[in-house]
């Protein structure tokens, strides 16, 4: 017997749900779109793995996004780009 899916997004207010739909329709950032789509699919009753599969992501990524959204809210949708390597300074 399969284990029931246990990770879902918290209950959203109508204004939060509207904001999520607006993000999925207007954003040009692919990471933000993917994360908002996973959260929106979870609010519609899809499991984390099904929601992630809609965007060709792993089930672990879907659970990670949902947990982050439950903890941080809309800030979890924004990508956290790291700076990367320090620029090389050429000798003068």
Image (cartoon, rainbow, N blue to C red):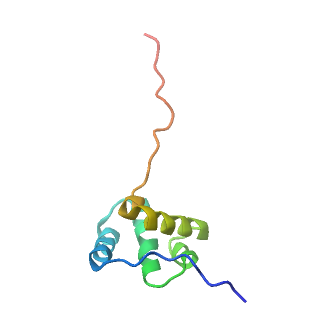
Of all residues shown, which one is farthest toward the right?
1
Is residue 74 positioned above or below 82 on the image? below
Question: Residue 71: image x %, image y %?
Answer: 45, 63
Is residue 90 positioned above or below 17 on the image? above
Is residue 40 positioned above or below 65 on the image? below
Q: Quadrant of the N terminus?
A: bottom right
What residue lies at 58% left-to-right and 79% top-to-bottom? 6
Numbered-mark total? 0
Question: Residue 17: image x %, image y %?
Answer: 32, 77
Question: Residue 3: image x %, image y %?
Answer: 67, 83
The part of the image, by quadrant, that contains residue 74 is bottom left
What residue lies at 33% left-to-right and 72% top-to-bottom? 20
Foreground pick, 40 / 12: 12
The part of the image, by quadrant, that contains residue 7 is bottom right
The part of the image, by quadrant, that contains residue 39 is bottom left
What residue lies at 46% left-to-right and 75% top-to-bottom? 9
Is residue 56 positioned above or below 1 on the image? above
Of all residues shown, which one is farthest toward the bottom?
1
Foreground pick, 1 / 83: 1
Q: Is residue 47 left or right of residue 89?
A: right
Of all residues shown, which one is farthest toward the top?
92
Q: Quadrant of the C terminus?
A: top left
Foreground pick, 89 / 45: 45
């Amino acid at each position: 017997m399969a284990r029931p899916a246990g990770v879902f997004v918290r209950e959203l207010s109508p204004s939060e749900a509207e904001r999520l739909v607006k993000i999925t329709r207007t954003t040009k950032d692919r990471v933000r779109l993917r994360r908002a789509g996973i959260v929106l699919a979870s609010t519609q009753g899809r499991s984390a793995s099904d929601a992630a599969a809609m965007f060709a992501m792993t089930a672990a990524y879907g659970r990670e996004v949902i947990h982050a959204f439950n903890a941080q809210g809309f800030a979890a949708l924004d990508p956290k780009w790291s700076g990367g390597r320090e620029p090389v300074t050429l000798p003068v």
